[in-house]
Amino acid sequence: MTSTSLIAPSPAAPSADIRALRNEFDRHASYLTGLPPTPYQVEKYVDFHARRTLQPASDFDALLFRISRLGRLGLVLADAYTGTLYRVSLVRVKLMLALAILECSEPSFRVIDAPDPGAAGVFVAMGVRVARAAVALLVAAALLAPLHLIYALAGRAGRSKNRSAA
């Protein structure tokens, strides 16, 4: 595995890990679509993790992942931060995996691929989304950027070459 890779082949996951993955995907599905996942979608998420290990690339990346598991607010903050200021992260990889599964299966693809309401409604909806994203990013940056700096100064925010499999 290269030093920048977040994905590696995986041995079979223990049942406790499977429960954690199911809960994780449930949070991701709810966050991304507002819908609970189907058993098929959960199975695909767990199956991917059984075949590939996703692990944090650094101690700061691990912190972001722990924050994302603190509930919806933690996931919003971790998503906002990793979506703009720390793009190559475990949180981002897991959210993109969840989104890929959700957009390829019923019923969530209907939410993801729903057409915009049209005319002025598009601009209003876009404005609301931009405002929410801006607030989330400002709060995330205010809380996480100082931690990122501390980790960077301690040499724990960069890519680690010798991280053991999680």
Image (spheres, grey):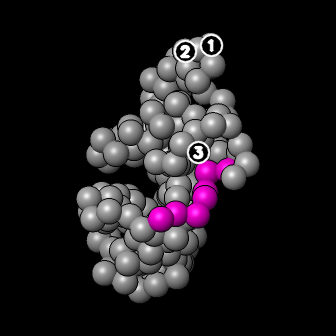
The residue identified by callout 2 is 150
Going by the image, does 166 lie left or right of 6? Answer: left
**Tally of numbered discs:** 3
Q: Is residue 69 left or right of residue 64?
A: left
Estimate how packed mark 2 is, as few (under 14), some (14 to 19) or many (20 or more) residues with alpha carbons within 10 Å. Answer: some
For label 3, the crowd category at 10 Å Cα-Cα, with few meaning under 14, some 14 to 19 and many 20 or more, is many
Closer to the camera in the image, 64 or 162: 162
Image coordinates of residue 99 in percent, x first then y, are 51, 67
Amino acid type, callout 1: Leu
Asked whether the beta carbons under mark 3 and mark 1 sit within 8 Å of each other, the answer is no
**Above-or-below relation of 18 to 86:** below
Q: Which residue is mark 3?
A: 89
Q: Residue at x 27, y 65 (%)?
A: 15
Element on which disc 2 rests: helix
Q: Which residue is mark 1?
A: 153
Point 26% across, 59% down: residue? 16
Q: Amino acid at mark 2?
A: Ile
Closer to the chain start, of discs 3 and 1, is 3
Q: CA distance from mark 2 to mark 3?
A: 17 Å
Compared to residue 23, the image places residue 148 above or below, namely above
**Mark 3 falls on what kind of element?**
loop
Q: Farthest bottom residue?
A: 106
Among numbered discs 2 and 3, the one appearing first in the sequence: 3
